[in-house]
Image (cartoon, coloured by chain):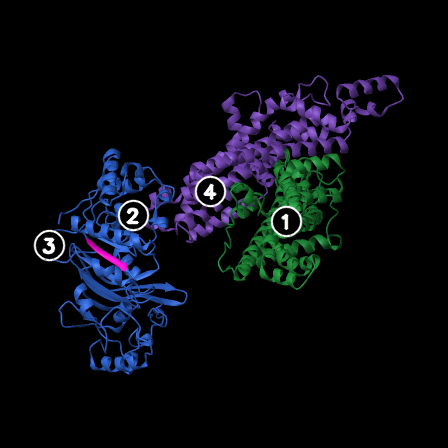
Chain colours: A purple, B green, C blue
Amino acid sequence: MRFWLQRLAAGLLLLLAVSMLTFGAMNLLGDPLFNILGPIAGDTENPTSVALIEAAEAEYNLDKPLPVRYAIWLGNFVTGDFGVQFSRDGAPPVRDLIEERLPRTLTLVVMAQLMATLIAIPWALWSASKADRAVDKASTVVTFLFVAIPSFALAVIMKWLFTLKWPIFPQTYNTSDPFWDRVWQTFLPALTIAIPAGAVYQRLLRTDLITTLQEDFILTARSKGVSKRNVLLKHALRPSLFSFVTIFGITTGALIGGALVVEQIFRIPGLGSAIVEAILREDFPVVLAIVMIITIGFVVLNILVDIVYTFIDPRVREA
Amino acid sequence: MSDSTSSPIDDTIADIPLASPLEGIAGAVTGHVPEGEFEGASKRRLGFGFWLAVSWLVTIVLAAILAPYLPLEDPMENIIVPSEGTPPYSPSSTFWFGSDQDARDMFSRTIWGARTSLTVGAAAILFGMLVGGSLGMIGGYFRGTSDKVISFCFLILLSFPALVLAILITALMDRSLLTISLTLGILGVAPVGRVSRANTIAFADREFVTAARSLGARNTRIIFRELLPNVVIPMSALALLGMAVAIVAEGGLAFLGLSVETGVTWGILIQIGAGRSELEAAPWIAMAPITVLFLTVLSLNFAGDRLRAFFDVKEAAL
Amino acid sequence: MTEFTDHDDHTLAPSRTHPEEPLLVLDDVRTHFKTERGLVRAVDGVSLSIQRGECIGIVGESGSGKTVLSRTIMGLLPSTAVLSGSVDFGGTEILGLPDKQMRHLWGAEMSMIFQNPLNSLNPLMKIGKQITEPLKLHLGMDKRSARETAAQLLRDVHIPEPERRLDQYPHELSGGMRQRVMIAIALACGPTLLFADEPTTALDVTVQAQILEVIAEQRRERNMSVVLVTHDLGVVAGHTDQIAVMYGGKLVERAPTRVLFADMKMPYTKSLMRSIPDLAAPSHTTLATIPGRPPDLVNPPVGCNFAPRCAYARDRCHREEPPLVTAGHAEHQFACWYPVGSPEYEERDAELDAARAVPVAVGGDD
């Protein structure tokens, strides 16, 4: 029990630290007033402007010291109030923007991870069974290539090959299309992210499988007459999953970065493009909200990974 | 390494080196790094592939350094060749890599792009190693509070998806070559720091350090004479891998319009060529820089990988 | 002996043989491994035979080839192994058969228990599942009958609360219990041949006897043959019908157990005997050991393998390899130029006695 509480506490501490840093960075390095009002913000001569400035300052608490502003923001955030978007009058509150965009990015990342796993596990099993033979060496070269290629480069290549040269996949993402159409439109972008991730997973799994296959209990399984296929699937696979599970959790964070770029290239209006636009506009509430959401996801994922660990390895449950 | 209160992730994050973005995390996490793919690459020798990668890197670096002196077209100049119709021109004897929509020579642009990209990559990892390496060594050597603080900072840095952090910084500051390099360097501080810290801890426990201390050596002397050579040299592999990551990260930034403002980098070139119409009409605009970028990143990755395997063996022999 | 068809209706099994015919016959079996350094002659010409229900002890130091021999008979070797000779199991030649065919025997007709039960059991799989696996595979049992059989097997090996154990994991059991589980797994489908590879080495002394008893008990009840591989002569003393001593990949002495202990011929066997610690000896007695190291299996010495370490060796031992000859008793074979009891042996023995300042307390024939 104590273990979980400690993890939770560490996670919360992290979230606080991240939020403080981001908040501080944006407010100190940027100019909130300018973002809200535009060029008027510097115009202290004109009384109308001054009135607008003062009104804005009051509304957005800009007259208060930084720590107080942070506290106000934090208080609002934990109750679900993410504030309003800065630089657009009449724009929906940040909360709505997030609700609209988050599912798209989530779908993308979830699909990508799913594909990566589906690619990696059978491939790893196959190459472990053929370890060090010619086909396996060839396969290792292939995975190395896929791991090394930058995601945006791969995205451009995929876009060119599969939507233009051989138009298998749709070229655009339409937010107004029905659900399954949109899923199909997300397929290629997800695949783009999934391929390098899947290659990483495959290489890791293969190494672990090969190591596991040297263990004594594998010999026992063989001596019972278990077929090679079942030795791999039923005996060798599960003990080899630990590193994979660890990595799975960590790379989801890295994948979000990949998702940003992919969303740009395939023009999917998700969280990624939202944060990019927001940063360029210096729209603080949006940036803060999205950063927090991503970090929360990161913390939650780490905890989930720990939970999965206890399922895979009964020995850990005792600890 | 692991105590009952830390999760497997905490322990494993401690060893994240930079490698091809995800692999580095994976590889270090578990210590299982798929190595030495090619025939003849044993752990004792660096192998044929290593030298192949190095020769490519040397070529591209030389080309980048010597760009102003090579007989290249001006990368910014529009070279209309009426006999070949309207731009973009496909690859030919006049334009080795073809030209883009504005009739600029892609071959020249790619080489000039190498100049900036490689500079950014090198500067970034240099910064990362300097700052990250030092912090890691300090934390790993002195332990105690300073270590806890430094480690926590690393953790925060690691929790940000790297690209978001980079975007944040570049959006708030200017976009000069220096800033971009420093920003990418900051991305490298935490991963490098963790490796440096782990290596320092491992070495500080060894006998020759205790011996030095018992002879009355002061801490600074120990750090510089004993630890530095042993911690840093194995991190040369990390330097290569880190450079690859930095170059790729710059590419990502370019795609979001946040890269260097003047001049060209590979990322910017690819971004220019990645629009739908460009890809349809003239894929080489993007493909040429993509190929060169890919080969460079591949070589850096491979060479770094081989170096890491090479040093692992020597350390094991200790 | 019943003819046996497994789940897939393959009849690769000991065909009906007369109960007096041997179950297993080895003829000049050699197992060599191709390595970077050269050809490792792990097993270099071993011949023996085992009857149904008989227990043979294969004794030797590490590196003597005893484990490789048992794996060779089973067929559980890596593909780098070069095999020659003949292994006849119930009338069928099984040396060199592909895995696909051997799998019908493995677990069904012949099975193995290994040295370290902690590592030899799948740590992430429940005990019950590990036992029912061969039952379902070879005997085609359904889930319920397999589970019942598994519980009965655990009872057979004297594990208390068998039902509960079925749902436990290996790390929840003690070392002795784990080894019993391994035995239960090995016995699940009623094999005619059981290999026990150093079954007690990793266990406490007190538990060792229990485990050997369990094996012996099951052997009697099932009329099963057992190959007991160990470095410990003490272990084989009480439980075997015949003993084969191996050194450097070769068979150096073989006899029915009583005959062997009464009349050891090979000096090496004698040394093994002497190196068993004697509980009755006074404290701080120096343990007798055999000086030197096992032979290099890539470049074995010319002549007798043991000659470099043998206190009784003479010129001929270093030049010519002694052949396997039969002693007084028809079943007693040994390979030595100057065996125990020969004039040369006695002569050397007297010289050594004089040199020994302090009498070393040993078990044996003095």
Please identify the dominant SS of the magenta region: strand
Q: Are marks 4 and 1 on the same chain?
A: no
Q: Amino acid at mark 1?
A: Arg
Q: Secondary structure at mark 1?
A: loop
User: How far apart in space, not on screen, are marks 3 and 2 (Cα)?
Assistant: 28 Å
Q: Is residue B51 above or below residue A53?
A: below
In the rendered structure, are the residues bearing label 4 and label 1 in contact, judged by CB atoms less than 8 Å apart? Answer: no
User: How far apart in space, not on screen, are marks 4 and 3 (Cα)?
Assistant: 51 Å
Question: Residue C19: which disc?
Answer: 3
Q: Is residue C346 above or below residue A102?
A: below
Q: Nearer the viewer, residue C338 or B289?
A: C338
Q: Amino acid at mark 2?
A: Met
Q: Amino acid at mark 4?
A: Phe
User: How far apart in space, not on screen, are marks 1 and 2 (Cα)?
Assistant: 47 Å
The residue at which mark 4 appears reads as A242
The residue at which mark 1 appears reads as B143
In the rendered structure, are the residues bearing label 3 and label 2 in contact, judged by CB atoms less than 8 Å apart? Answer: no
Q: Is residue C310 above or below residue B132?
A: below
Q: Quadrant of residue C129?
A: top left
Q: Is residue C304 left or right of residue A160?
A: left
Mark 3 against mark 2, which lies toward the viewer? 2
